[in-house]
Image (spheres, rainbow, N blue to C red):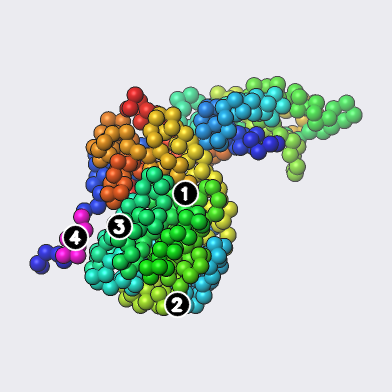
Amino acid sequence: MTDAADAVLDLLLENARYTTTDIARMTGLDEPSVSETIQSLEDEGVIRGYRAVVDWSEADRERVQAEVEVNVTLDRETGYEDVAERLVEFDEVTSLRLVSGDYDFDMEVEADSMRDVSAFVSEQVAPMPAVDGTVTHLVMASYKEGGMEMDDDDDDRLSVSP
Amino acid sequence: MTGHSDRVDRVPPSGIRRFFELTEEVDDVISLGVGEPDFAAPRPARDAAIEGLERGRTSYTANRGMAELRELVAEDYARFGPTYDPGSEVLVTTGVSEAVDVGVRALVDAGESVAVAQPAYVSYVPCVRFAGAEVVDVHTRRADGFRLTPEALRAAGADEAEALILCYPNNPTGAVMDRDELAEVAAFARDHDLTVISDEVYADLRYDGDHVSVASLPGMRERTVVLGGFSKAYAMTGLRLGYALGPEEAVAAMTKVHQYVMLSAPTPAQHAGIEALRSCRPDLEEMRERYDRRRRFVLSRLDGIGIDCFEARGAFYVFPECPADDAGAFAEELLREAGVAVVPGGVFGDAGEGHLRMSYAAGMDDLREAMDRIESFLG
Ligand SMILES: Cc1ncc(COP(=O)(O)O)c(C=O)c1O
C-alpha cells in the first residue's frame, strides 16, 4: 500500500465519516488524491463498506447479540468455503470467521430478541448437514465495538489552563 | 496579618484564571483553551506508579531524584547532543513549574534582571518577580514567526540582563527554532554573558524535524540550564514531574533550593517517569502523530475561514491573529455567542496582544465543531 493509502485508511478506520476535505486537511494531501485513494481502496475491495458502531444498550430498540462457536465436519463435497457461503447469507450473521483452536467458525449473530437468536441457531444453523455442533454465548454487556469504547470518557481537565 | 508582600502585589491576577471562570459560566462550551494533553498517561507508566504504591514505596527519594530516573533522563536528553552526569548535573523536580521557580531563585539575585522572550508561558514573569528580580520583556514578533532574534534582544536591552528565559517549541505560539536561528541567540548570550534557562518541555512535540537544544551550540552548555518534563510528551500533567539539566554548579545551586522547598519530587511520579522513559516512546510517537494531524486540520480550517495564522510547528497550539482589534473582547464574545473557548494572546504578555491561542489537544470531533462554530460566528 502507498503511504497515502495507508494514511487515508488509518483515518477512515478512526472515523469513516471524515469527509474527503477533512482527510485532505489532516494528511496534507490534496482533495482529488484523497478521493482517488478512497476510490481505489474501494475498487480493490480493501474497503468493503461503512457502517455505524452502535451501542445497543443506549438505543430504544432491543437488539440481542451472540457469539456462536460453530463446529463442522467436512467431507469430499463440502469444505469450509461451502459452509461459510451458506452462513453468510443469513441477515442474522453479522460476522463470520474461520478460526484456529477448539472450534471452526466464530460467528457473530444479531437479532431482535433472545428467542430469535436461539431460533436462528437451532433452526437454521444446527440442522445444516455439515454442522456438528454449536455453542451460543449471549452477549451480556459490550465494552468495545469496532474499536470504539462504549463508555463515556469524560474529560476531567480544567476547561482553560495555561 | 498585615496583607501580603510587595513581591506578590507586583504580580497581577492570572488572566488564565479569569478566562477559566468565564468559561465555567457558559453551557455547551468546546474548549480550545486547554494547555494539557487530552490523552491519559501511557498505561505502563500508570502501572509503574500503581505498583510502587502497592509495594508501599511512599517515602521521599533522594533530593535530586531517584538515581535510575536521573540516568534515564540524561540518556534520553543525549539524543539532542549535550550529555549530563546523572550524579551531579541532573535534578528531578515537581514539574517544570518548580524547575522554573527554583532555577530563577538559584541563578539570579534580587534586583538583577531576567530577559523573558514573549509571548511566553505564564509562570516565567511571576517567578522572576517572586524572586525579587526585574523582568526585561523581549518581544518576539509574528513577522519572525515568533522566533527570538538578536535584534529583539537588543531592542529590549537584554544585553544588561543576568539571564534569559526562552521556550521552544513555544507555548503559546507553537513556534520552533532551528539551529541557525538559535545560533544567533546563543552568540548574543555569549557576548553578553547571559545565563540561559531553556524550557524544553515540548521538545518531543515537534512536527517537522528534530528539536534543537540551545545547550548543543558551541559554548552554550556551560551557561544553559535546560528544563524538561513529562507533562506534555507523556501526558503526565497531574503526576507533576520534570527535571533540570545543567552544569554542576548551577544544578547544585538549584538542588540547594529544591531540597528545602520541595525535598523531593513525588515518588509515584518518579516511578511512572522511569517507566515512561524505558518503554513509552511508542505511545509518545502515536500521540505526536495524532497532534500533527489535528494541527494540519486546524491550520487548514483557519486558512479556509480566512483567519491569518502562521504555521505552528511544535507544542499543541496555534496562535492566529485575532480577526478583531481587541482579542480579549473577541474571545469573550466568541465564548458567549459561539460557545468556543480560546485564550486571548495578551494573557501571555503584551507581545501576544492581537492574537488568540487555540489548543489542539482536543478530539477531532470537538475541533471540527469548534471550527464550524467559529466559521459561522464570523460568517
Ligand atoms: C512552556 C511550559 N512550561 C512549563 C509548563 C508546566 O509544566 P509542568 O507540568 O511540568 O509543571 C507548561 C505547562 O503548560 C508549559 O506550557
Q: Give the residue type that dot 4 points to.
A: Arg
Determine the secondary structure under disc 3: helix
Residue at 43% across / 32% down in the picture? B303
Q: Give the residue type that dot 3 points to.
A: Ala
Outermost residue toward the left in this view: B2
Residue B131, compared with residue B208, is above or below; it is below
Determine the secondary structure under disc 4: loop
Outermost residue toward the right in this view: A76
Q: Which mark is residue B314?
A: 1
Q: Nearer the viewer, mark 2 or mark 3?
A: 3
**Do the residues at pointers 4 and 1 share their chain?**
yes
The image shows residue B330 at horizontal and vertical percentages of 27, 35
Q: Mark 4 and mark 1: span between their CA atoms?
A: 32 Å
Q: Is residue A54 left or right of residue B36?
A: right
The image shows residue B365 at horizontal and vertical percentages of 45, 34
Q: Give the residue type that dot 1 points to.
A: Gly
